[in-house]
Each structure stands twice: as C-alpha cells, then as structure tokens.
Image (cartoon, rainbow, N blue to C red):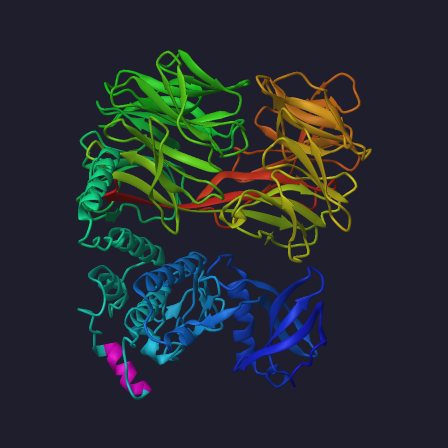
C-alpha cells in the first residue's frame, strides 16, 4: 500500500512518492535527525515472505553499503516498517542514462567523461570483491551536476575468493551455474551462458554501455532476447567510423568474447580513457580574421606565436602517451627507480601479507625477480649500480616519513652493509660517490649533503630529496608539521642557500628533476589527497602535466623523459570493536577516516577526514559507534573530544586559531591565536581553558594553555616538546609530550614533569585505566598491534589484547591512533590501506 505524505518510517518522514519498480516503491523523505532529504525504497509487504526478493533487497543494501565512492549510490540506513523492509539512500536529482540516451548519442567529451566515472565506480566495487552483474543505462543515473551514480546492486555477487570452474569457493549469495541473471542486451557471453562470472563480466557490460553512449545504438541489437543473446555470443559490433580510433580500441578490448582477452580491471579502463582524452585534447584553431585590415591581425598573431614559442619552446603536437603496467599484485609500492641502463626498473613493495622486498624487471619482458632483500625498502640506485636501502623501517615523529637503518648493497647481487640509522630518505649524486640523506632528530629533520654535512633543517619534516643531474642542487618537499602531508617544493645548493619554488599543497608526495634540470616534477593536490602530476620551474611557474581519476605518485624520470608513476588507491579505515562484539566493525565515513578521540564509554568516536572526499581540506565528524550516520561538525584537523564529551576542539585549517564545536545544540566558538602554528588542541577539564601544541615563528613546538575567552598563551613545557596524538591528555590532569625520545607527563596546572616508566620511545598512549594507576600503550611499528597496560608505579607491562586486521594487503604504517576504554574491553583505531600499480608512461611533457 502506498505511503502517504507525513507518514513516519522510523526517523524518516515521507514527503512524496518518486516512483515504483519491481523491487518496491521509492519515496522522497526527510531525515528528522540530520535535517536532510533522502530516498527510501520500501519493499511491498506482500513480498516480505518471498525469500529471493528479500535476498536481493538485502544484497543491494550490503553491497552498496560496503562501498564509499562518489560514483556509487550511498546507502545510509536499512530497517523494517510494518513488516516491510526499507533501504535509505542519498537523494538524487537528474535522470537515468537511459532517459538521456533516448535523445540520441552523447557528445564525445561527455561520453568519455561518463565512461570514466562509471569505470571508476566499478573499480571501487571490484576492489571490494563485488561484481554488479547488471550494468546498463537504466542502472546508471546522471545527476544535475554531471555526476554518474551506479544504482541497483540487487544482482551483485560478492566473492571473497577466486572462482574455480563452475563453482564459487566462497560467496555471500548462492549462485547457481545455468541460471541467467542480468539484462540481455548488456550481458557478457559467460553471463548469457549461465556460467559463473567475475568482475570481467562488468567490463563487458561497460563496453556495451560505452558503445551506446558513443554511437546512440546498441552494441548487440535484436528483435528478441534470443536474437540479442546470439549476437553477443557470435558477433562483433561495428566500430570503424563510428567513434575515434582510441575509444574504438577501448570498446573492442572490453567486448572480447573471452574474459581472459578483455581489459582485466576497471582501473585499466580509467587509465586508458584518460590517455585517449589527454591525447585528443587541445584548443581548436580560431576562425581566420576578415580579409580587410589583415596586416594588424597578422602582426598580432605573429607576436602571440613568438611569445608562445619562447614560453613553451615547442608548439608541435603532443606525442602519443603510452602506458605500460609493470606490477600485477595487490599491495603497496614504497619506491621505484629506473635501472642505470634505463631499460628496466627496480622497486620495493609489500605484496599481500608478505614482508617488503626489492624486485626488478625489464620493460620488454613480463614478470619480476626478487632481489633477496626481505624486510628492506628501496631508497635509491646509483649510476654505478649501487642500491641504497632502508632496513628495520619504523614510524618516527612523522608518519609520512618512516625511518630506518640506511644500508648499501650492489644491484648485481651481494649482502647489504649498514651505514647509518634514523634515516628517512636518500638519493645518490650523479657520479654515484655521494649520498644526500634526510635524518630524523628530536628537533626535526636534517637534510645532509653529502651525508654528514647539514645544509637545511625543518622542525616539521623533509621528504623526497633528489639531486639535480649536474649534482649542484637538492630538490625536496618541505612539510611544516610532522603529522601532515601538506608542503612545498624547495631547492637548496651545496651551501644551503634556499629557494622555495611552489606554493603549499594540501597533499604532496613524489619528486624528481626533469631531464634538463629546468623543472622539478612532483605529485600533489591543492585540496584533498588525490595526487596530480605537476611541474614547477626555477622561477616558480607551476603547471599541471597530467591528471587522472585515480591518485598518482611520481617515482622517477629517466634521462630520455619516460616516467614511472604509481596509480594509488588509498583509504584510511576506522575500525571499532565493542566489549560484546565478536568481530571488528568498520565505522569509516569518507576515504580518510582518521580516528582522533573516543568517549570514555566507547559510544562516540571523533575523527577527521582530509582525503579526496573532504574536497577543500580537513573536516571533522562525530559518530556514534552503534553505526548511526556520522554528523559533520565543520572544518578542522586532528579533533579532540572534550573531557565531558559535550564538545570537540580542533585547530583551524590555517593553524592560527582553535575551533570549539558543540556535539549538540549551541554556538561554535573560534579562539584566535595569532603568531602561532597549531598542530593539536583540546579542552582542559575545567572547561575554561584550552591546551594546544604548536610553535611561534622561529621557535620549536611546545604545549601551551590559554583561556577560551582569549588572552596570551602560557607555555607549560620546554621548547621541543612534541604532541602525542591521539592520547594527548592523560587522566584529565596531564598532557603527554615527547622530548628526547621519551614520553613525559606534564601537569596541566603546574608541577614537575613525570617520565612515563615502562613506556619505550616507540610506544604511544591509547588511553588510561579506570583506576588511574595505569596507561594503555601500543607501538605503531608492531603489526599485528599489541595493546599493553603499563603500571604507572612500577613500569611493568601486561599484554591486554592483539589487533589483527583481516585484510593485510597494502597496510601502510600498520595500526595507529588506537583508543581503548578504561576497562580495556572496547577499542577503535585507524589504518591506512594503500593498493598500488606501477606504470611506465611515455609522452608526458
């Protein structure tokens, strides 16, 4: 029975009916808790006893709900209303792709844009092991702002393991061989035959949709389902003359009859589309001026042409971009460099659940060979064939710059020789006789060139040092805060003379000199975390070289201009386990859910989002651990829950003020702190003061306390005291700081500092015990993580529990930002999962 306007379905108030289909009726509704409009799909009560319909309905919720991607419909909630299940999703405004195609084929650039978005959404689903199985224009929605959303996961299949023969070794749903599921015109051959399918079936369906967007015609027409199925199994669609050759090749490789001969991943499709788009892009020539008064126009045109020649030196058409995928396993790549002869690559990676190792491969042959340095990470390779390695890597002060034991080894084979410790990065001079290194100290990072000679220091951290080809300058990335990836491109000479080339980027990693030394190339983003390839000249002119739907990380540039890039899929997950839970639950919201605080009762977590989903910088959320939707509080980073649990305190994005957000009703308060750069902040238990860790200009960081109504900050620790997130406040009385490699308790209201006995320089505070006599600690460099209780009087440690993530592939930096309740039974944490593909790219200029 249709629901009338005003009907309450749980916390949702029905506004109007949107439409109906075979799986139920869809309504526009108001979420009365968060004051937003949503869509509700309600399964008819008469279908509630239909096991198959219920299964598909639940599968749609589980499949889409497990995904968090801008091109996939977001699922907010599920429930039951008067014995009828319902599903709550984001409310979309626009039209289906089918409605749009009824008006004819799409313009070329629009078809490519939509195709790229569809492939990006499929890549996210496939990375979670979810195959949609019903990709068609009816299940693709075009929003008013041009965003594609993939709908209806009711036929989706989740495979946690591989498919063998005609049976699934593990599935959430039962899939019967011989049962045809999907829509005839967009089925893959294996789907049409009723065979077991995997993600490559979606790639075939995508090819059908892409063909239709480009041509306005179906790839496999027919008057009856039998005719269509016969065409899918036996015919190939006509491509020549119907679309540009570059797109024709993509469609052809998607529509191969054999799954093994198709493009093997949706991310490959994204990369291929982007390559064709970049190749075909360019301004159209302007119409010629009228014949009358042609001389001034000609002179002006020549002047413009001359200026362009001097500015860009080369007006010839851009060379064709070629992409060669070099790695095919699942995990993280730490670094990659061209071999000295330029015909191969050496890289270090952590694949699946294995320790890191070094590998090498030649571009003309598939596969890779392990070099036998298990547990080591690549830092550089010299022109003479010597490798710089990092051994026993661990996280120091800067989480984005792990440090380790620097070692040297011959590329041709042989044992590594350790030479120095606490080294984050290294690069060889052109002659191969000298190293430039980044050394971590208690006072920040030191850039040394040659090793042993300090030419630049930073109280935050320094990353990615690379020597120019003439050996006279070092380019690197300069980061002002140890806990942030934002930074700028800087160049220094051998005497330490500094030149800042770029403005500050919100996220910046990866750097290399252009072959001519006239530019430094790097990957970064002005907002969020999706890396794009940029170049900056010695005069500071910044230009965008290449952007892709996935995040890019620059690894190296050869002397002839070829580029090594990694396509990077990063996601920071927020995991939670309550005292009565038998397994962990994911509470992530966007793509970079970094836990910062948990309430003492374990019912609320506070976290920051600073990835691509944050769009314009960091934003702060609070979320109940029962799984209720996250509540957006506002911009900020590294938020801290107040001791009474009623407000959240965060440094502003600019770092020169402190923001206090109420959890419930009430005004937001901003406390200006001019002249300071603030990294961490929180509320003192009395509610009248705030504390923060930051630094004044030309001073090292330390802790300060100031009134919430303003005034002068009062230092309470010596300079050089770094903050210790997430457990910065201990027992409401102390601030936990790190100085001289030790964790120290600093009384908020004055008094002598107290060293934490039994806590090593590698351990962080996760919380304090209910009796106030102990603290919980963990090491960011242990994986799996072990939480221990440390007795504050004796320093004795007791193992409380181990944290073992289920999916270990690409786990970057291990488990971090652990929070645990005082009884040691409820905990939450964040971990960064990074899945990389290494690509050789030609034609970038």
Task: Estimate the x, y position of residue 642 in percent, counting from the top left.
Answer: 74, 39
The N terminus - image quarter: bottom right
Q: Quadrant of residue 234?
A: bottom left
Depth check: give the residue in front, 168 or 101.
Answer: 101
Placement of 256 over or under 373, stated as above or below: below
Q: Is residue 442 left or right of residue 156?
A: right
706 in magenta: no
Task: Estimate the x, y position of residue 495 in percent, counting from the top left.
Answer: 37, 11
Q: Is residue 802 left or right of residue 354?
A: right
Task: Estimate the x, y position of residue 129 in percent, counting from the top left.
Answer: 43, 60
Placement of 841 over or under 159, stated as above or below: above
Residue drawn at 57 percent across, 83 percent down: 50
- Number of numbered discs visible in the structure rendering: 0
Residue drawn at 21 percent across, 36 percent down: 306
Q: Quadrant of residue 326?
A: top left
Q: Is residue 152 visible?
A: no
Q: Is residue 33 visible?
A: yes
Question: Magenta part of the protein: which range?
Answer: 225-233
Task: Estimate the x, y position of residue 54 in percent, counting from the top left.
Answer: 57, 77
Placement of 88 over or under 471, stated as above or below: below
Residue situated furthest bottom in the rendering: 224
Residue drawn at 70 percent across, 24 percent down: 704
Q: Is residue 67 left or right of residue 244?
A: right
Q: Is residue 260 left or right of residue 776?
A: left
Depth check: give the residue in front, 808 or 337.
Answer: 337
Depth check: give the residue in front, 285 or 429.
Answer: 285
The C terminus - image quarter: top left
Residue situated furthest front in the rendering: 292
């Amino acid at each position: 029975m249709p629901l009338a306007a005003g009907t309450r379905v749980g916390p949702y108030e029905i506004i109007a009916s949107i439409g109906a289909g075979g799986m139920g009726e869809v309504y526009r509704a108001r979420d009365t808790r968060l004051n937003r409009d949503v869509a509700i799909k309600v399964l008819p009560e008469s279908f509630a006893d239909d096991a198959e319909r219920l299964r598909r309905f639940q599968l749609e919720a589980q499949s889409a709900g497990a995904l968090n991607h801008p091109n996939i419909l977001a699922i907010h909630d599920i429930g039951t209303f008067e014995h009828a299940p319902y599903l709550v999703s984001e409310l979309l405004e626009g039209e289906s792709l089918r409605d749009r195609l009824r008006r004819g084929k799409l313009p070329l650039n629009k078809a490519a844009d939509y195709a790229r978005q569809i492939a990006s959404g499929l890549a996210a689903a496939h990375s979670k092991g979810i195959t949609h199985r019903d990709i068609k224009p009816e299940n693709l929605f075009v929003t008013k702002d041009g965003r594609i959303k993939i709908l209806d996961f009711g036929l989706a299949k989740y495979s946690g393991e591989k498919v063998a023969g005609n049976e699934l070794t593990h599935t959430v749903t039962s899939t019967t061989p011989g049962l045809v599921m999907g829509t005839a015109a967009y089925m893959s051959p294996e789907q049409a035959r009723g065979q077991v399918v995997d993600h490559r079936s979606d790639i075939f369906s995508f090819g059908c949709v892409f063909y239709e967007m480009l041509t306005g015609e179906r790839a496999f027409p027919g008057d009856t389902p039998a005719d269509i199925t016969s065409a899918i199994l036996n015919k190939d669609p006509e491509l020549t003359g119907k679309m540009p050759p570059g797109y024709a090749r993509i469609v052809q490789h998607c529509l191969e009859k054999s799954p093994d001969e198709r493009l093997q991943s949706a991310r490959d499709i994204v990369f291929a589309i982007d390559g064709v788009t970049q190749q075909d892009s360019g301004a159209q020539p302007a119409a010629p001026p009228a014949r009358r008064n042609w001389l001034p126009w000609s002179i002006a045109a020549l002047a413009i042409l001359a200026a362009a020649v001097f500015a860009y030196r080369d007006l010839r058409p851009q060379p064709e971009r070629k992409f060669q995928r070099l790695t095919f396993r699942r995990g993280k790549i730490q670094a990659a460099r061209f071999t000295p002869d330029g015909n191969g690559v050496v890289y270090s990676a952590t694949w699946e659940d294995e320790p890191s190792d070094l590998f090498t491969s030649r571009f003309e042959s598939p596969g890779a060979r392990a070099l036998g340095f298990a547990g080591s990470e690549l830092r550089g390779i010299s022109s003479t064939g010597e490798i710089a390695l990092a051994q026993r890597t661990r996280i120091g002060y800067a989480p984005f710059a792990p440090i380790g034991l620097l070692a040297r080894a011959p590329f041709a084979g042989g044992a590594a020789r350790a030479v120095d410790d606490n080294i984050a990065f290294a690069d060889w001079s052109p002659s191969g006789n000298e190293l430039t290194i980044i050394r971590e100290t208690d006072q920040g990072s030191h850039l040394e060139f040659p090793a042993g000679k300090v030419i630049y220091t930073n109280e935050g951290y320094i990353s990615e040092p690379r020597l120019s080809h003439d050996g006279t300058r070092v380019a690197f990335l300069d980061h002002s805060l140890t806990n942030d990836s934002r930074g700028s491109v800087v160049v220094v000479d051998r005497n330490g003379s500094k030149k800042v080339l770029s403005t500050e980027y919100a996220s910046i990693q990866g750097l290399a000199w252009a072959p001519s030394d006239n530019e430094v190339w790097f990957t970064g983003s002005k907002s969020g975390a999706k890396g794009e390839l940029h170049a900056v000249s010695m005069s500071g002119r910044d230009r965008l070289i290449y952007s892709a739907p996935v995040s890019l990380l620059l690894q190296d540039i050869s002397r002839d201009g070829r580029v090594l890039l990694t396509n990077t899929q990063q996601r920071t997950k927020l995991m939670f386990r309550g005292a009565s839970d038998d397994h962990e639950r994911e509470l992530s919201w966007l793509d970079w859910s970094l836990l910062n605080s948990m309430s003492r009762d374990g019912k609320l977590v506070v976290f920051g989002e600073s990835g691509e989903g944050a769009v314009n910088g960091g934003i702060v959320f609070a979320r109940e651990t029962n799984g209720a939707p996250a509540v957006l509080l506002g911009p900020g980073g590294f938020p801290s829950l107040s001791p009474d649990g009623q407000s959240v305190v965060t440094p502003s994005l600019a770092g020169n003020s402190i923001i206090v957000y109420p959890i419930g009703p009430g005004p937001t308060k901003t406390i200006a702190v001019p002249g300071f750069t603030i990294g961490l902040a929180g509320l003192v238990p009395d509610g009248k003061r705030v504390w923060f860790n930051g630094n004044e200009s030309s001073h090292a960081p330390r802790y300060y306390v100031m009134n919430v109504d303003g005034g002068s900050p009062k230092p309470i620790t010596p300079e050089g005291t770094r903050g210790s997130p997430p457990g910065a406040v201990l027992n409401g009385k102390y601030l936990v700081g790190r100085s001289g490699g030790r964790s120290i308790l600093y009384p908020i209201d004055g008094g002598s500092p107290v060293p934490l006995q039994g806590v090593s320089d590698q351990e962080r505070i996760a919380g304090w015990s209910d009796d106030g006599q102990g603290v919980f600690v963990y090491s960011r460099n242990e994986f799996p993580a072990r939480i221990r209780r440390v007795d504050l009087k004796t320093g004795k440690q007791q193992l409380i529990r181990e944290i073992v993530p289920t999916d270990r592939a690409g786990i970057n930096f291990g488990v971090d930002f652990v929070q645990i309740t005082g009884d040691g039974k409820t905990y939450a944490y964040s971990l960064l999962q990074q899945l990389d593909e290494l690509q050789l790219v030609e034609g970038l200029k």
